[in-house]
Image (cartoon, rainbow, N blue to C red):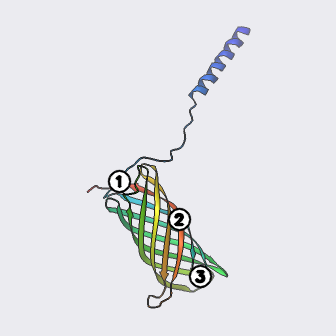
Amino acid sequence: MKNICSVLIAVLLGLALTTKAQITTTTPQTSAKVGDAPIKAGNWMVGGSIGSTSFNFATETFQLNVDPKVGYFIRNNIAIGGQGTIGLSFYEGGSTISYGIAPFIRYYFRETASPTSRWFGEGALGINGSHKKNSQEDLPVSLLLGIRGGYAHFVARNVAIEGTLGYTFTKADIASSSGDSGLGVAFGFQIYLPGKSR
């Protein structure tokens, strides 16, 4: 009986040591050396800002936005596309829901390129509308003009996380001299899909 117990203990100890030796720890991937592959002519990008905040200088309002985006690379480093905007503004006395759509153009700077990241600049021109919460009144549709700069860091071959800083100007009545402007900070991601190369 003692021999059987000794053999059993030896087998269990051997299994435990073998199992411990096979356990390996892996760290998550935080960057990928992609070079120019994701931003070549013919590729697509899909994503957007999953959360952005801005402060309006004229009305002293705080806004939270979600901005989906899709673009197509017409040349290496240059993408054109469209973006939507859904936002919620908070101000003293209430809140406003805003929405909009704007075509954009984005340029990735070659001078600041690294194997895992790129700086970019982007401009957008479109329309923006809003609706006051608990009100039957829709505010006039306005002209939207935006410019922003950002940094894209590739965490996988086709995925980049982004941070941007931008300035937006909206004008409800084009004939009038009044308008609103504000700075915004956004964080999001882009998925780069290979397309038909030119």
Instruction: Note whether 3 is above or below 87 in the view shown.
Output: above
Q: Earlier in the sequence, mark 3 or mark 1?
A: 3
Q: For marks 1 and 2, give the one nearer the viewer.
A: 2
For disc 2, the neighbor class at 10 Å (few under 14, some 14 to 19, many from 20) is many
| Outermost residue, right side | 2
Instruction: Note whether 60 is above or below 194 in the view shown.
Output: below
Q: Are marks 3 and 1 in contact (CB under 8 Å)?
A: no
Q: Which residue is mark 3?
A: 59
Left or right of 24: which side holds 72?
A: left
Which of 30 and 3 lies nearest the eye of the viewer? Answer: 30
| Outermost residue, front side | 111
| Outermost residue, bottom side | 175
Q: Are marks 2 and 3 in contact (CB under 8 Å)?
A: no
Residue drawn at x 58%, y 26% is 21
Residue drawn at x 63%, y 82% is 134
For disc 1, the neighbor class at 10 Å (few under 14, some 14 to 19, many from 20) is some
Residue 148, image x, y percentages: 46, 68
Q: Which residue is mark 1?
A: 194
Q: Quadrant of residue 17?
A: top right
For disc 3, the neighbor class at 10 Å (few under 14, some 14 to 19, many from 20) is few
Q: Are marks 1 and 2 in contact (CB under 8 Å)?
A: no
Q: Secondary structure at mark 3?
A: loop
